Amino acid sequence: MMDTLRKNSRFVALIAIVIILVVVNFMLYQQSQAAGEEKETLEKSKSAAMVSLTAARDQYDVVKLRQEDAALGSMQFPTQHPVVDLAVFIADGGPRLQVNIVEVGPFTSASETLAGKAYPAYQSKIRASSGSLSNLIGLLKYLEGGYFSSLKIKDVAFSGGPGGWEATFTVVIISQN
């Protein structure tokens, strides 16, 4: 057997080289597959980052922010307490949204702090009822998004169930003086 191997040493060396080349080729193929998957992952991450960057540019666009700031600066911030107008506004909202305004408490003086500065305010406790919770929520949206830009709602509490809902909340209106 040794004689046969000696006679065919070139053939054995050729087979060993072919086996080594096949193993190296297989290893390179696996590495290229892993690199392809990594490239695909990186391309997805790049596209996600580009979308996020575009959104961030829109969000922090200086010109757009200045325009929004100018629009906010021109908002109606009353110079005095429009208590009567506010009471009428609240009373009008009830029938529009199918809400019964049960009680509007007296408007009392208060103070609210905005951006570290104290402003005079009036506040009133309100109790409203409706057959639907969504109507009561609609009333709160109506009040906050309505005519008075310095109006805010706090201390909201809901109670009730299938037969009807009741909400109690405090309406605060802030003025400059």
Image (cartoon, rainbow, N blue to C red):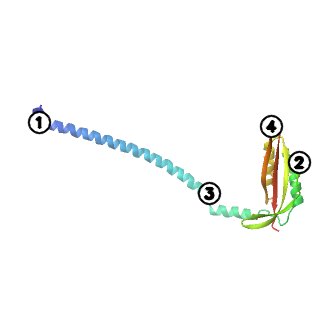
Classify 158 as above or below 66.
above
Q: Provide the residue designation for mark 3.
A: 58
Query: Is 82 in front, or is 126?
Result: 126
* Residue 102 disc label: 2
Query: Is 80 in front, or is 133?
Result: 133
**Disc nearest the viewer among 3 and 4:** 4
Quadrant (top left/top right/bottom left/bottom right) for the C terminus = bottom right
Q: Secondary structure at mark 3?
A: helix
> Quick one: label 1 or label 4, which is nearer the N terminus?
1
Circle 4: is it few (<14), some (14-19), or many (20+) Cα within 10 Å?
few
Residue at 39% in and 42% down: 33
Cα separation, mark 1 vs mark 4, equals 98 Å
Q: Secondary structure at mark 1?
A: helix
Cα separation, mark 3 vs mark 2, equals 45 Å
Residue type beneath disc 2: Val
Residue type beneath disc 1: Arg
Q: Provide the residue designation for mark 4.
A: 162
Q: Are marks 2 and 4 in contact (CB under 8 Å)?
A: no
Q: Provide the residue designation for mark 1.
A: 6
Residue type beneath disc 3: Asp
Q: Secondary structure at mark 2?
A: strand
Residue type beneath disc 4: Pro
